[in-house]
């Protein structure tokens, strides 16, 4: 499987964020997008996820399931954790498993892998910032998708959480998945770097 972008341009609010950008990531590989604030790291992830439309260029996934689009084969973990506060931690995972469809994994086991099984029955509104991040990580596990798009994925995680997530990312890569992550910090797994220049 190969995810690639060719000559990508991005406009936000009438301003060119970046232009002529190329990238490539293959199965079993992590690509770390680095650069200063405002350089377009999050915008690039959102373009790959299908949440924004490029003003130029193309983004393609080769070797995936031909009947599915790239967004349907991707998980996007953004700055904001997509959590339903009135639902329990486990109910949140059931919701996302049913909403996303695809190859489902046991939600309770996904919580255990993310180190959050002790809070399964707790309303999500009571979670700390680090626990909310762990719940978002469990969502990556509850439905199997080959492409992980991660925006500052270790944000709010303590040292133990960062170590745990590094292991989960390594497991994902070892199964042939690929990761594209916007980050200011080391990911904890071997990654090629794509640096985006400063904002104009």
Image (cartoon, helix red, strand yellow):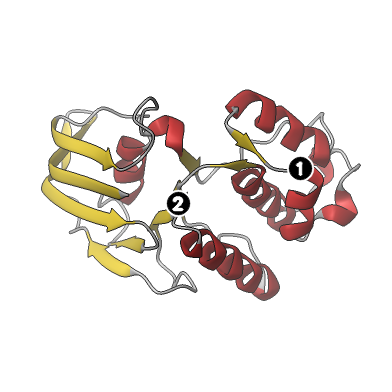
Q: Position of residue 100 (x, y in %)?
A: 59, 28
Frontmost of labels 1 and 2 is 1
Label 1: element kind: helix
Please name whichever residue, 41 or 12, is drawn nearer the observer in this view of the structure: 41
In the image: residue 147, left or right of residue 91: left
Residues at badges 1 and 2 in contact (C-beta under 8 Å)? no
Q: Residues within 10 Å of mark 2 (few under 14, many from 20)?
A: many
In this picture, is 133 found above or below 165?
above
Residue 173 visible: yes
Q: What separation in Å lies between label 1 and label 2 (alpha carbons)?
A: 23 Å
Q: Residue at 51% of width from left, 42% of height from top?
A: 145
Q: Residues within 10 Å of mark 1 (few under 14, many from 20)?
A: many
In the image: residue 50, left or right of residue 195: right
Label 2: element kind: strand
Residue 200 visible: no
Q: Residue at 45% of width from left, 54% of height from top?
A: 177
Please name whichever residue, 138 or 21, is drawn nearer the observer in this view of the structure: 138
Mark sitting on residue 23: none
Residue topped by disc 2? 151
Q: Position of residue 154 (x, y in %)?
A: 55, 62
Residue topped by disc 1? 107
Q: Residue at 86% of width from left, 38% of height from top?
A: 123
Q: Position of residue 82 (x, y in %)?
A: 62, 36
């Amino acid at each position: 499987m190969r995810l690639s972008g060719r000559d990508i341009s991005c406009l936000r609010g009438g301003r060119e964020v970046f232009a002529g950008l190329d990238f490539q990531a293959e199965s079993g590989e992590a690509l770390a997008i680095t650069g200063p604030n405002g350089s377009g790291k999050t915008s690039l992830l959102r373009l790959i996820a299908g949440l924004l439309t490029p003003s130029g260029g193309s983004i393609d996934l080769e070797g995936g399931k031909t009947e599915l689009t790239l967004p349907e084969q991707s998980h996007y973990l953004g700055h904001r954790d997509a959590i339903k506060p009135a639902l329990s931690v486990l109910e949140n995972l059931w919701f996302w498993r049913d909403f996303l469809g695809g190859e489902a994994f046991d939600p309770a086991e996904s919580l255990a892998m993310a180190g959050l099984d002790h809070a399964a029955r707790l309303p999500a509104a009571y979670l700390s910032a680090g626990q909310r991040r762990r719940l978002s990580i469990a969502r990556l596990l509850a439905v199997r998708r080959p492409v992980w798009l991660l925006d500052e994925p270790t944000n709010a995680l303590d040292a133990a959480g960062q170590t745990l997530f590094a292991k989960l990312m390594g497991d994902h890569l070892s199964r042939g998945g690929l990761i594209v992550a916007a980050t200011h910090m080391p990911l904890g797994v071997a990654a090629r770097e794509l640096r985006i220049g400063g904002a104009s």
